[in-house]
Each structure stands twice: as structure tokens, then as C-alpha cells.
Image: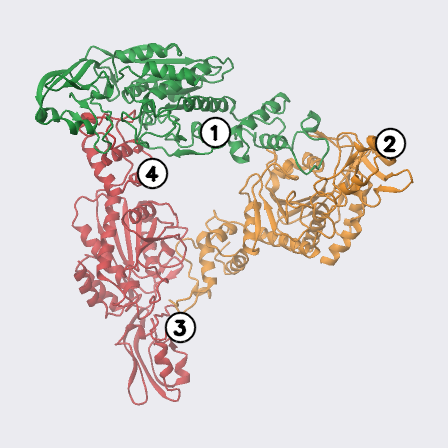
Chain colours: A orange, B red, C green
């Protein structure tokens, strides 16, 4: 799978993405080879709660030339060079006039920063601080930005649904609006698309799975303005998928609820399958948890990441690139989501049909007939735990936590007990 | 008392005990010198929930001879030599044919294992691995088992009750079905019998005490099939008494409820009277807690033990014998149960009759008349705690936990406050 | 402020104070320069719950002379020399007869102890153990105590109220009955009086503030007999003010409730403003928490102290004097109470008026317009926390605890959000 992920990565990487624009449409066209999206265009200006969909931005060309006509900064080389949502501009400027339009990272002088100005009209270029220092202060520069901000445009949103037996739902929400960023951008849609691909082949799903490919903030806000009430009613667990591309340890950031099903399952699976992982309490910072976990919705959504936003120096710079990410690690991340889904599909409060004393497991072939052996099999122990706690109040994750028996093993035991008719 | 315990131990030790059989009847006949049991015979085949009472098993003689007629393995020397519930057999076998009927412990080559086959018809012998290795593989062996499995027999159960002023109950449940095992068998009935003896002399009991002398598993299941509904309604605390014969530190295994009265009192008494003890969370493994704490009953019953089953190498082997146990320690265990009972008898939510500000203790002779002395007596401090927390929501154990004042002292203070009429 | 505190200290120090008497009236007369008290005389014999107001005690002169007429022990030199509530006496005694009336501290031989005998008629003198040992055992001593115990007298109580916008109340309860003790006496009324002075100048108070200047125990009991029902209904938080005069670390002793508003605010403020402080669980010992936190009232009242009663060797001796206390530390204590009051005044469960997703802070000038900057301002983070948790269930103290953002900063953020109309 990792080679296919890489191929998609290479095709998507050069495209300029933002809140809106043709690059987003092209991105969805490519991803729709994996996910049969329902795509909608939301007109610029559309009100979503306290917000409005911004004008559609398309940038075709943008550069700074010196007086010799040499292109010093060129959008066609790296999308990050152009400040996101830059307005069009053409003119000649002294260094002093240009200076206020240049953005750099003095602490990371070799890297281009990622910056946007969605809600205030500006133009600007991002460049390495090294390059900035090398600019001739006596020069006159020619600047050209061929971009449009179209109030009659639209934001392109995409969703796909896999129907399961139940109308209870699990949501994957990811976003693409950061051009030329690898872990904090492309990894999210890529991992989510391959989770979709794996689940779409299954015919036994209990849950209905919803996949939303958004833009950060305004995309999630639009999505909630449309589906928020539905999700409040139907959602059992959800994942914000971002920063999942590097090979650092997994990080799980809890939902605002803190002990929701999604929190329990992610902690249990990471604890039982990973040597090392990070657990982060909810805070109203970061990504789209700010919307999904706003107090009016308070949805049971957590963030399963690798190295978290803000925790790696490459974050929001040109160094969050193909070198930084690992396609093998992305494949493992897809599998981790599938493991979590396996647990969610199997997890519930089962009922022991023989709650008064133990059912006699021996006559069902489930108990060693030679009593009092000093070592009792792990299987017997797991059966005992499942039966004892299947009282309608403990789900399988609770039983795993109380017994310290891995979910992977409990799930096998449950299958046997279901088949033998002692559990429903 | 410890000498009387030892005398009973010596009389009971040679008797073969199992789920059923005449050895059990003989055991109860001897113990009835201490406890005036009501004894019942439960017919083989009787249904109890998912189980049936097994046929009655009696074994009179069992041995393996070599071709010279020498008895190599002999039930009359150690009851453990015969696999529990062995069916009758007589015949000559090669070593190869005999081999599948021999049970040993290769990791503890000097010890005879304890094994049973209650619910599958087999015959077999248990012997030390050393002896097993010394058997001549070229020999022909003569095997004789004079045993009966009687479908028209019965299981002999016994109960005794000491009525107190209230119909709220405390249950002691112990079992004897392990022949020739000292701590994980005889210690339980012996300690329980001597607790009975001490309580039967008291005329001031508030609780009604019930003593059940069962067999492990099927005995408890039968008992619950008869008394389970009653116990669910009336039981305030119960004890499974087993593994209480050695001189290891006390172990308390919590009830499934986890914070029931029995859990609170056992933890508080052990904490306040023992330098060292073990606290074990509930698990649906071990002994009759599997039945009493099954989800349908979920009774407030814990296990007060010395070294717990499975935690000592002698467990379920011929080394769990008279040398392993300590009659002095059993006497201390009896006293520990009586201390716990003293607390249970005294414990309740008392009511401070002067809840608004303090009652004036000085005019009742309970307070030093010279105010502001730098050292205040422990007695005054204990009175203050009892009065402050006797609000109908804290029992004496809660007050002890919050104040760090031992229950033994609080109980004296309560008597004074009751007598002075400030507490009821 | 600290010089004014010291001036009042010096004027109040020589006055003899007790449960009753003219010294108390004089003390209130002086303090009424700061606090416009409502003063009441409660007749001796008045019943308050299980107690009665004692007779009024006034002592004018008291000494022990040797046969040469030299005054060895003299009440006019230190009030502590006379056992509190001593009955009048005049006579000549041998050392042996005098001995039973002398009280010393053998473990602190240089210090005079503080002792009283309110509820048993006695007379006596307190002196240093050194002086006691120097007394000539062959001497005849002349003793004179000019004191009166008047059953027709009264106890003088004082209260002042600052009305705020709401009828919800905050109570400061302090006492003066220990003569010639500095931290465990005068510091309480002094700090409380200066808290009053500061609050009385404010016109924006939400809470109504009540200041009770009591006597320990019987004063609080009387006060509760009159105001207890009212306080149960109206009191949101209260402080017992004692032992607040030295420069030791602050100590907060929790209310009986344990997690009341007063407990939350004191812990949060101390945690956020002090490097070092002590937190003490409730116990029904100490001072007037024994009455305010008796089970019938269980008021939300804690004790903010410096070094706690019983925790310093000078406690209840002549060494708890002007040298022991610090007027600078008392000023800091006044400020600490005012900081706590600032939080209480501002604290409530605010409501985010935009609970569905985030309000768009950018269009209100509250968010950086250049998105994706790596460092986000602390102000933005604090706004996000306040908005996310202002769901009607978290007050400002809860938000501070969850976010680890100091209350002082959150309070500024709240003001901005209120002004911008996103919070009410």
C-alpha cells in the first residue's frame, strides 16, 4: 500500500491548495480515483454560523524579479512562496516598499514559512530568511501576482459515506488547504482515503462511516452548519485526521468529553499495540476540534496523529516535505485506524445469558476436564472476565481495562461465547 | 485454642473428601462437635442453574502394583494419589498403557499433584515426577481402584445460623473437598468453625450470622440456587474462607462491588492492625467468589486469606500439608475475623443529637475545664470527629478513614457519647 | 498600610480581652474608627443551642506578693499572668496552698502560658516555669485578685455589613478574646478591619459582605444561633480569620464540604500567587470552623492563615507577641484577601453566545489576520479556553484549573469578550 500512497502523494504535491480554488478541484478529482465523493460547490458569501465562505482564490503566477530580470522568488517553484489569499499586484518597488510584504522565519533561516491572510486583503511573499538577507537593499524589484479573488466563486467540499447495518455513525474528518506541506496536509487526506478504500471492501459493517474532506476551520464550520444537528444525534465516534505522515510515535488528543467512546478505544488500542505513544488532554487549540468540540456541539471526536502540530520544528515550514514523511508509517497509520474500527465494530455491552453463578463451561467443551491444574489457560481467564462483566454495564473496552486482557484476545473469546450461546 | 485446632486437624486430615461421599459425612460429624449443623443430602442430578449435582463418589482402595506384587502407589497412604472422581478399574497394563493415566508435576518433581475429573469419566493416579521416572518401562503393572460413582447418591451440605437482633445477615462460606490439603482446604472449615464457636457464646449480636460449609463451585452454586434470592435481600457482608492456614501476611481480595461494607471493614481493620498485608482487586478467578460475585448475584462478599491460592508453590500439591500450616496463625485468623465482626456490630451511621454547633462537652464532664491547654487529649479529638461526621451519611469506618483514628478507639468514644446522650 | 496596622496593634495590645468585659468594649471602640460596627450586648445566661453566655468578667488588679511585699507576679505587667475568668480572691497562703493555683509550661520554661477557666470557677496565675522554680517554698504569699463575675452582665458582639448588588453573601468571621497574644488574636481583627476598610470604598461590589467580630466558640455559637439560618440560605463563601500575623507561608484549611467555592478560590489564588503554601484538609479541631462547619450548618467556610494554630512553638504563650508578628506580612494578607475577593466578584459561569463552532474573532479585531503564525498569542489561547468552557457548567476558576491559565489573566480576557458581546 505504501507505494500507492507515495504515487498519490507525488501527483498531489505540486498542486496549489487553499480554502478555495481550482487546485482543490483537481485534488478531489485525483482522490476520487479512491473515494467516490459527492462533491458540492458552496458559494462564496454563504453564511455558516458567525462566518462566511470567503471569495474563491486562484493564483496562476507570482514572482519577484530584480532589475536584471532574474526571478528571485517564484510561486511556480514552491507554492509556499506566495502568501495564501494574496490579492493581485503588479509594480516596481524599492526594497523599502517591498519589505513590508516579505515574510520570513529568522529563527529557522533556511526555511520558507507557511502563511495566509484569508480575511484581510494583502499581498505578500514568503521566503527563507537567508534569501531575505541576501536581497540588495539598493535594488528596485518588479513584483507580479496574477491572482483572482472572486466573490462569485465557491468552496468545493466533498463527502463519502459507507452505509453499515446501523444508522449510528463514525466520522473521519480531514482537510486539505495547506499547499506544499506534507505531514500537516497531505498525510491527512491520503491516510483517510486509504482507510475508506479498505472499509469499502467490507460487507459486514455495523456502523455507518462518513468521510468528510474539508478545509480547516471554515470547511469544518460549513460542514457543521449543514450536518451538525445530524451528527449530534447519530455520531458515536469521530476522528480528526491530520499530522499523520511522519514516523514519530502516535499521539492521541482527547475529545472535549474526555471519556467518550473514541477516547476509550484510542487509548486502549494504543496502549495495547504501541510501545510508546502520547496522550494529550483536550484543549480548544489546534485544528478542527475547535469546531467539532465547541460547546454547542461537543461531539465525541478526537485526533489520532503522529507528531502533533506545533511539536516538530518543520511544522508550517517548507521542511514539512516529502523527506519529512514516511509512506511506510502512513500505511501503519491506516492499519491503526482499521484496528480501532475492528474494536468499535465488535465493541458493545454483551449480556451473559447465565448471570446466576457461572455457566458450566465444561459441558460446552470450553473448560479443561482435569480440574485443579495449577496453570489455567489464558482463554479460560478471558472467558471468566467476559462472562462476569457482561452485565449490561461494561462494554468490551471496559472489560479489557479491568482485566488487563488485550482487546484482540477478548474479541476472539467473545466470538466463541457467542457461538456457544452463553452470550448475546 | 491453637491446640484444639490442631487436634481437629489431625482427626480430619486422613479422611478422603471430595464433592460427595462418606468422607464428607464423617468430616461434618466431627465438626458438628463445634458447630450444630443442619445437614442436608442433595440428590445427585439435582439441577442448580446451569449445573447438576454429580453422582456420589466413594473410593475405598486404590493402588498400582508391580509384577512382584509391591504396591508402588497407594491411595491409603495419601488421598492425593487417586485422581478425584476416578471411576473403578481393575486390570494389568503395560507401562505404555498405564502412562496416560499418570499425572505428575515435572517442575516440582518431589511433589504429588492434586487433580480431579469431576465431569468427565476417567481413572488415574497422581504421583511425584521422581517416582514416575523410576518406574520400569518394561514392567507390567496391576491396577486396582475400588470406587463407586452412584447416580442415586447425594451431596452432603451443612449450614448453621446464629440469630442476632436484626435480620440483616453476615455470611461465612467455606468448603471442604480437597483431600489432604492443609491451607487450601482444612484451614477454611477449621477457622470458620472456631469463629462460630466464639460467636455462639455471645448474646448481644446485632447481625444474624450464617455459616455455610460447602464444596467449592458446585456446592456454592447449589447454595445460591437455594439461598441466593434471600442473600441478595438480606446480606450486608460475607466472607469466603479459604487459604487461611499458613503464617504469611493476610490477603484481602475485594468483592466485585469493590467498595462494599465488607471491603471497607476488611481494609480498615487490616490497615490498623497489621504491619503488612496484601490487597487484591476482584477478579472472576479463584474460588467461590466466581459464584457469589457472578453478575446476577453480585453479593458483597470478599475473601480474607493468608497466602492466596496460586501464590505459594505448595498450592495444590502434597506439600500443602501440616508442615506448611501454623495453628498459631489460624488462631490469629480467628481473632482477626472476630475483630472484623466487632467493628461490623458497632458500625453504623450514628446521629449527633446536637448538630448545630458543638454540644457543650464540658458540662457533661467530657472536656478539660482548663481551656487552651496546648496538648488536647486524643479523646477530645476523637469525640469531635465522631460528632462532626455523625450526620447520617458517615458510618464509623468512614469516620476512621477521614480522621485517621483507629476504629478500636472510636468504638470506645462512641460508647461514651451514647451513654452521655449526645449521640444515637 | 502596615504602619497604621502597627499603630492600632500598639493601642489594642495592652487591653485585657476575654469572652466578656469592658476590655472588649474598649477594643471595639478603637476598631470602630475603621469599621462602623453595629454593637449588641447579649445578656449573660442567654441560651444559644446547647450553651449559655457566661457571666461578664472584669479584672482590675491581680498580683502575688512575697512576705517582703514585693510583687512577684503582676497582671498589670502582662494580662496572661491572670488565669482567664479567675474569680476574686484575697488571702495569705503557704507555697503549698498556692501551688495548685499556679500554671506553667515546663517544656518552655521561659514563657508564660495562656490559660482560661470559663466554665469552672477557679482562680489562678500563669507564670514562666523559671520563675516558678525560683519561688521560695518556705515563704508565705499574699494573693490579691480584684475581679468580678457578673451574672447580670453581657457579652459584647459586633457586626458590620457592606451591601453589594446581590443578596448572596461572603462572611468574614474573626474573634478577639485572647489577651496579649499577637498572631493568634490581634492579627485576626486587624486584618479583617483593613479588609473592611478597602471594600467599603468600592461601589461596584456584587456580593454583600458581612464582618463578624466574635469571641471564639461561644461568640460563634451565639452568632449562629441568630444568623445561622440566614447564612445557610445566603452564604456563598466565608473565612475564619485567625493566626494571620506572622510572616510564615500562607495556610488554607478547607471547609468541611471540601470542594466549596471558598475552597476552590483559595487554592487557586494561593497556587497562582504564592511560591509556597500549605493546604490542610478539614478537621473538626482548631477554631470556629468547629461551629460554622458543624453538621447542622456545614457552611462553606475555610480558614486562611499564615502559620496555623498549634504549628508554632510560640502559640498560646507570651512569645506570641509583637516580636513574633510582621505588620508587612499582615498588609500582604489583607491584599491576599482582596485578591480572593476580586476573583469571587468576577467569577461565575459565563455563557458563550456563539456556542456552535468558534465565533469569528478576526472580524472583531481579536485574532491575528496573518494566519498560521507559529507562535499564537497567549491572549488568543485564553480567549479560546474561556469561549470553549463557557457552557454554563464551568466557572472561571474551573477554566483556570483546566487551562492552567492564571485567573488574573482570564479576568482581563473575560472583560474583552464581554465588551465585544460574545460572552455574557
At x 19% / y 60%, what residue is drawn?
A: B2
Chain hosting mark 2 = A
**Label 3 belongs to which residue?**
B107
**Label 2 belongs to which residue?**
A93
* Residue B368 is at least partly visible in this image: no
Residue at mark 1 shares a chain with residue at mark 3: no
Q: State which quarter of the image contains the C terminus of chain C.
A: top right
At x 30% / y 22%, what residue is drawn?
A: C181
- For discs 2 and 3, the disc positioned in front in the rendered view: 2
At x 45% / y 60%, what residue is drawn?
A: A381
Residue at mark 2 shares a chain with residue at mark 4: no
Mark 3 secondary-structure assignment: loop
- For discs 1 and 4, the disc positioned in front in the rendered view: 1
Which residue of the protein is positioned furthest toward the front in this rendering?
A: C68
Viewed as shown, does residue C408 lie left or right of C33? right
x then y, percent, for residue A283:
59, 38
- For discs 1 and 2, the disc positioned in front in the rendered view: 2
Distance of label 1 from label 2 (alpha carbons): 55 Å
Q: In which quarter of the view is residue A387 placed?
A: bottom left
Chain hosting mark 3 = B
x then y, percent, for residue B220:
33, 57
Mark 1 secondary-structure assignment: helix
| Badge 1 vs badge 3, beta-carbon distance below 8 Å | no
x then y, percent, for residue A2:
71, 57
For disc 2, the neighbor class at 10 Å (few under 14, some 14 to 19, many from 20) is some
Q: Answer above or below: position of C40 versus A183.
A: above
x then y, percent, for residue A413:
51, 59
Q: In terms of sequence position, does the residue under pointer 4 or pointer 3 come before the other?
A: 3
For disc 4, the neighbor class at 10 Å (few under 14, some 14 to 19, many from 20) is some
**Label 1 belongs to which residue?**
C269
Which residue of the protein is positioned furthest toward the right in this rendering?
A: A68
Viewed as shown, does residue C344 lie left or right of A109? left
Amino acid at each position: 500500500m505504501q507505494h500507492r500512497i507515495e504515487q498519490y502523494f507525488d501527483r498531489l504535491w505540486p498542486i496549489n491548495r487553499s480554502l478555495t480554488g481550482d487546485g482543490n478541484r483537481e485534488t478531489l478529482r485525483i482522490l476520487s480515483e479512491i473515494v467516490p465523493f459527492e462533491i458540492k460547490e458552496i458559494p462564496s458569501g454563504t453564511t455558516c454560523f458567525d462566518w462566511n465562505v470567503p471569495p474563491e482564490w486562484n493564483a496562476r503566477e507570482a514572482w519577484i524579479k530584480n532589475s536584471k530580470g532574474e526571478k528571485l522568488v517564484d510561486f511556480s517553484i514552491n507554492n509556499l512562496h506566495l502568501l495564501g489569499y494574496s490579492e493581485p499586484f503588479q509594480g516596481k518597488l524599492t526594497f523599502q516598499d517591498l519589505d513590508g510584504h516579505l515574510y520570513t522565519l529568522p529563527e529557522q533561516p533556511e526555511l520558507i514559512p507557511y502563511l495566509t491572510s484569508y480575511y484581510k486583503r494583502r499581498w505578500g511573499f514568503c521566503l527563507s530568511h537567508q534569501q531575505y538577507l541576501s536581497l540588495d537593499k539598493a535594488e528596485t524589484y518588479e513584483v507580479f501576482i496574477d491572482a483572482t479573488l472572486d466573490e462569485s466563486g465557491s468552496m468545493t467540499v466533498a463527502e463519502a459515506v459507507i452505509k453499515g447495518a446501523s444508522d449510528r455513525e463514525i466520522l473521519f474528518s480531514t482537510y486539505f488547504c495547506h499547499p506544499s506541506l506534507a505531514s500537516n496536509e497531505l498525510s491527512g487526506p491520503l491516510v483517510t482515503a486509504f482507510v475508506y478504500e479498505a472499509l469499502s471492501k467490507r460487507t459486514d459493517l455495523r456502523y455507518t462511516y462518513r468521510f468528510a474532506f474539508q478545509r480547516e476551520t471554515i470547511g469544518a464550520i460549513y460542514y457543521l452548519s449543514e450536518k451538525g444537528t445530524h451528527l449530534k444525534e447519530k455520531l458515536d465516534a469521530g476522528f480528526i485526521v491530520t499530522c499523520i505522515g511522519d514516523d514519530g510515535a502516535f499521539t492521541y488528543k482527547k475529545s472535549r468529553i474526555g471519556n467518550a467512546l473514541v477516547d476509550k478505544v484510542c487509548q486502549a488500542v494504543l496502549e495495547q499495540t504501541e510501545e510508546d505513544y502520547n496522550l494529550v488532554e483536550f484543549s480548544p487549540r489546534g485544528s478542527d476540534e475547535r469546531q467539532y468540540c465547541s460547546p454547542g456541539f461537543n461531539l465525541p471526536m478526537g485526533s489520532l496523529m503522529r507528531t502533533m502540530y506545533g511539536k516538530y520544528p518543520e511544522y508550517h515550514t517548507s521542511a514539512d516535505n516529502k523527506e519529512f514523511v514516511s509512506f511506510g508509517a502512513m500505511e501503519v497509520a491506516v492499519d491503526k485506524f482499521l484496528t480501532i474500527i475492528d474494536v468499535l465494530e465488535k465493541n458493545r455491552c454483551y449480556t451473559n445469558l447465565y448471570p446466576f453463578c457461572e455457566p458450566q463451561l465444561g459441558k460446552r467443551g470450553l473448560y479443561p476436564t482435569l480440574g485443579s491444574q495449577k496453570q489455567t489457560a489464558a482463554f479460560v481467564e478471558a472467558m471468566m472476565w467476559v462472562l462476569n462483566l457482561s452485565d449490561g454495564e461494561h462494554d468490551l473496552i471496559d472489560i479489557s481495562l479491568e482485566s488487563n486482557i488485550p482487546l484482540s484476545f477478548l474479541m476472539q473469546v467473545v466470538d466463541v461465547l457467542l457461538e456457544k450461546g452463553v452470550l448475546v
